Amino acid sequence: MALPQRERPKAANRWSILVLLALGLMISFVDRTSLSSALADKHFVREFALTSIARGWLNSAVFWSYGLVQMPMGWLVDRYGVKWPYSICFVLWCIAAAATGAVTTLSALIVMRLLIGVAESVVVPATYRYLANNFEETQKGTALGIFSIGGKMGPALGAPIAAWMIVTYSWNVMFIATGLVGLIWLVPWLLTVRNDYPTKEELAAAIHRASSVPLKNLLASPVVWGGLINNFCYSYFAFYCMTWMPAYLVEQRGLSLEKSGLFTFFSFVGIAIVAALAGWGADRIIARGNDAVVVRKCFIVAGFLGGTTVLLGAYAPSLQMALLWNVLSLSLLGLVTANTLALCKLTLIPKQAVGLNTGLQQVATSLAGGVSASLAGGVSASLSGWLLHIGGSYELPLMAIFGFLLVGATSTLVLLQRKWAPKVNDIVPLELARTDAQTSAGVRSEAGE
């Protein structure tokens, strides 16, 4: 006899929870990127004696720890549900973000950033597990478009708010306030989301299902590698904008800290709007009977090519033109956002491996964040800092973005094909797995409960 399935949440409740997930993502990005405004503040830089390379590494610290535990977090939510792992991690990262305002040494600052990265690593695997369980193919683009708004509005709102608080109060107050205010989100989350922590019986079944797509099957799939490349290339540009855009606008284009926050806001509002519309538009085209893979690939390639216009901003002769290309290039990247997420993490991935694959994909995303700082968030944050150091201007960092976006477009065309999706192994029938699990673990039968 098959395991009883918990009822899928009602449609209205599903969309409400999706909005909460988007808000959770927004808060994570506010806490993750508030440092970028502090790094454009001369008092903060002087207090910690930061060089351009040190700023890059500091920007990237959150992404390295974030990437390190992505796969364990994916494994965790595949087996233990979404509600409680997310809740616990949310509290931890908010406290660490607030504590950043109280540190007095560079080493303590780095430790806080590492803790934020570890705790925030639950956000994306948990969200994709929820979407895989509750949304159909013709809803995925729209759902991911809505979810991705949180990731764009985080830096869009966080940059000007953080800049204003630093100028009006201090960088210490900014970190403490942005960290603690986010805790308000926990109230509707705990009240709205049902407890999906599995029983022993359900846990045995989840482990059984996940075993049909082991990690080696994911690593053998060109689709997974294409997704890794796409995530890296997309995130390299996005994380550059989150970590270095305020400093670029202040140092190379001569804007005040407040105005740099405002134009960062415009850029991320632009990508958020385009991402939501592109996800919805792709869903509508697919609903008319068109192939989901082909439709989403067209949007992705167009977005990567549109993003390459960022290089025009580097050579723009006037401030107005530079700001135009700055906003437009990131906005056009929004064509990629929801569609690459849907294609690489849901459409072409077996449902039972969504959490693990998402964790694997997020490793590339967080590495992208770190390079700009040292090698892509990790590489993007650090590599950009190094390129800025050796080039003396932001032209080399922007040329690197141009190259990565072309790589992303090529990867989409070549690797993201249905025939190369991860293989699902044959497994023992669920009824036998259930019986074995009950016998070995002493789980009570349904009749006896």
Image (tube, helix red, strand yellow):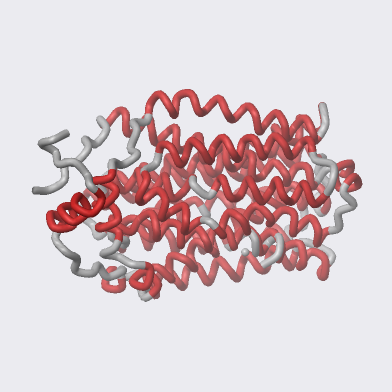
Percent coordinates x, y for residue 367 in the rendering: 59, 62
Q: Position of residue 304 (x, y in %)?
A: 51, 62
**Quadrant location of the C terminus?**
top left
The residue nearer to you, when weighing 220 against 342, is: 220
Quarter where residue 167 is shown: top right
x and y, in percent, of residue 121 in the image: 53, 50
Residue at image point 43% right, 60% down: 300
Q: Is residue 185 left or right of residue 179?
A: left
Q: Quadrant of residue 97?
A: top right
- From this viewpoint, is residue 311 visible? no
Residue 65: in sight, yes or no?
yes
Where does the image place residue 104, in percent across and percent down from the top left?
Answer: 84, 42
Left or right: residue 294 compared with residue 248: left
Left or right of 121 on screen, residue 206? left
Q: Residue at x 79, y 52 (%)?
A: 107
Say whether residue 111 is left or right of residue 143. right
Total residue callouts: 0
